[in-house]
Image: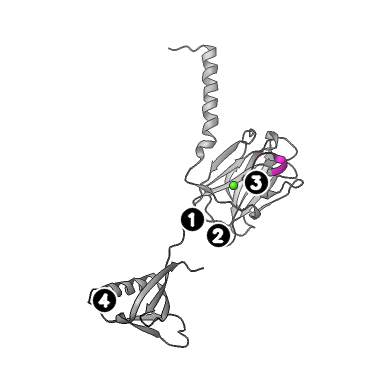
Amino acid sequence: MHFYSKKTAITIFIFLIFILSFASSSFADDPALQDLATDPANASASSQHRDRGPARAFDNLNTHYFVDAWEAEGKTGWLKYDFGKGNEKVVKEYSITGANFPTSSPKAWTFECSSDNENWTILNKVTNEPIFDNFEKRTYTISNTNQYQYYRINVTENHGDGWMIIGELELLGNIDPPPPINRVLLVITLVSGVEKEYDLSRADFNNFVIWYSTRALGTGAEVYTINKDFNKANFLTRKDYLAFSKIELYEVNEYTPVP
Ligand SMILES: [Ca+2]
Ligand SMILES: [Ca+2]
């Protein structure tokens, strides 16, 4: 049987508190995720004290709550970010950074999402968060796989001061990959000097290249037919017939159409 002195027991206890305090906060952070809430103009809030408006929680600055933090008019309030219609995001984590005023930091809140700015779904509920140190940042993981236009933190209790302050709020997720290039502008210069432009799908362009390179090797058809989609109302079908021997050169511009 082992006996521990009182001093050893206290040391172990302090060590456990040390471990647990780390486990509850910054280890939740996933380095692959990035802050998606990049435009302070998309922020709004239930209230603001003086000029300390909601945009200041998204300005990536945190030097003093006088100048770069959101301060609610009172102990509670919500802070919202609108990604915009057609730009909905999957937020997987969020982070709160306190300002230099620990007793103003949030203690209890819900983190919520919405598609219509009216009906809100709770993604995360925190009921007794320890007080934030000056400028301390904590990250919270949520199990969300859906896109939403709106996210907000709805603080219901702070750490005792008459006002509630948040230095920064981050909404973290994966950056969307750029959309695939699926249209091609093919510019053909004929031997005569005339230029012809064709807006083609990627597949149609590939067919053209196959024809051109095959013909260059001396096989394949002399003439290639390009179907033009535009002006179909006036011309039931509109085709251009390109003779290999008439083509001086061609060039290609890939682009992504605006939706
Ligand atoms: Ca800030
Ligand atoms: Ca930010």
Circle 4 is placed at which residue position? 215
Q: Label 3, on which residue? A: 57
Q: Secondary structure at mark 3?
A: helix
Q: Which residues are magenta?
A: 60-67
Residue that badge 1 annotates:
176
Q: Residue at x 70, y 34 (%)?
A: 103
Residue visible at 33% across and 74% down in the picture:
208
Asked which secondary structure carries label 2, the reply is: loop
Ligand 2 neighbours mark 1 (CB distance < 8 Å) = no
Q: Earlier in the sequence, mark 4 or mark 2?
A: 2
Q: Identify residue type, mark 4.
A: Arg
Front of the two marks 3 and 4: 4
The first of marks 1 and 2 along the sequence is: 2
- Is label 3 within 8 A of ligand 1 (CB to nearest ligand atom)? yes
Label 1, secondary structure: give it. Answer: loop
Q: Which is in the foreground here, disc 1 or disc 4?
A: 4
